Image (cartoon, helix red, strand yellow):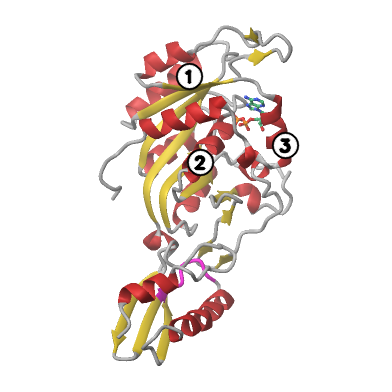
Amino acid sequence: MVTEQQVRESLEEVLVPSAMRSLVKLNLVREIVISDQKVDITLVSAALNSSAQDWLKSKVGDTIKQLPGVSQANVNFVQAASKEVNDVDYVVAVMSGKGGVGKSLVAALLGIALARQGKEVGILDADVTGPSIPKMFGLSGVRPGSSETGILPVLSKLGISIMSINLLLEHEDDAVIWRGPIISKVIQQFWEDVLWGKLDYLIVDLPPGTADAPLTVMQTLPVSGVVIVLSPQELATMVVKKAIRMAKQMNVPILGVVENMSYFTLPDSGKRLELFGKSKGKEMAEIAGAPLLAQIPIDPQLAQLCDEGKIERYSSETFDSLSQNFIQALPIKTKQS
Ligand code: ADP
């Protein structure tokens, strides 16, 4: 007789259309019942539309009937919201005191670091008024699959699940001029209505600053830790201190601090120029009581890869040490409830 394990392994091979992740990874397998030569499979519909459900019914039926000892396979769907299916181990939020310091870039690099380690990773672009994640990953213009009950993330080349308001706008350069409460609602919907499935890590690229939206994320999402991004040109360290204070007040551990645009290395002499002023990374890390994860230089190659949507190809010594330090700083604890 066929075993449940064999059936589950077969379902791991069935990719959900649009999402391009398996039924098992999306956590859509509710029940498997085996009696003699008959297998009954119950799947969860979540964000899948009716044509995706029909396709999966026949695909799963055919796949299971190929298993030895199976003569009949019945597949049916039950309704359940994405949030009932989503199973995210850790949420890591990336914040900055103000915009333009490279927060989204760092969020992208942290996601890439984890994906290269074989982790199941998602990036929720909560920087609703300045969303730049899809462009960096070359996903501009890609339309996410959706139904009345939810939205499917878009998968990057490395297999990172991505959701951003930019993927839902008619024109990518449409301005989002919503006020705080609406932005907060959108972020909450990205958490609840997007079918993330099973993820080891969800990286949240927060809106800059310490206003409504980042606050909502900290209050409504089970954030395991934050990474704070700053650049030396921030005139006053005050804004960074505010961000640090906010994380502390919300009782969210600070995993580390990343200083971006720390310096520029002259190609001929190898001399380091601190173009935006003296580094403040160490000082801020001390104030945060967290490690300085990296000091990222201004790197024309990095800017080019961002512009070309090829950020996943980036490699450098700085990236390697950022990855290592970040992975070491990650919380190891029992799962989020
Ligand atoms: P923020 O999220 O803080 O507003 P972004 O991460 O969107 O800022 O960065 C804006 C752009 O600046 C990136 O798309 C990239 O082109 C450029 N950039 C950021 N950091 C660097 C860097 N260290 N070297 C080169 N270009 C960078």
Residue 258 can be seen, yes or no: yes
Q: Please, what secondary structure does the residue beneath circle 3 have?
A: helix
The span shown in magenta is 43-48
Q: Quadrant of residue 252?
A: top left
Q: Which mark is residue 307?
A: 3
**Few, some or many C-alpha atoms within 10 Å of disc 3 (few <14, some 14-19, many ≥20)?**
some
For the residue pair 292 and 225, the one nearer the viewer reads as: 292
Identity of the amino acid at label 3? Asp
Q: Main secondary structure of the magenta part?
A: loop
Identity of the amino acid at label 2? Gly
Query: Which quarter of the frame holds ligand 1?
Result: top right
Tell me if label 1 and label 3 are in contact, CB under 8 Å. Answer: no
Q: Quadrant of residue 307?
A: top right
Q: Please, what secondary structure does the residue beneath circle 2 have?
A: helix
Residue under the image location 61 percent in, 51 percent down: 157
Q: Which mark is residue 111?
A: 2
Q: Position of residue 223 (x, y in %)?
A: 37, 40
Q: Is ligand 1 within 8 Å of the beta carbon of the residue shown at mark 3? A: yes
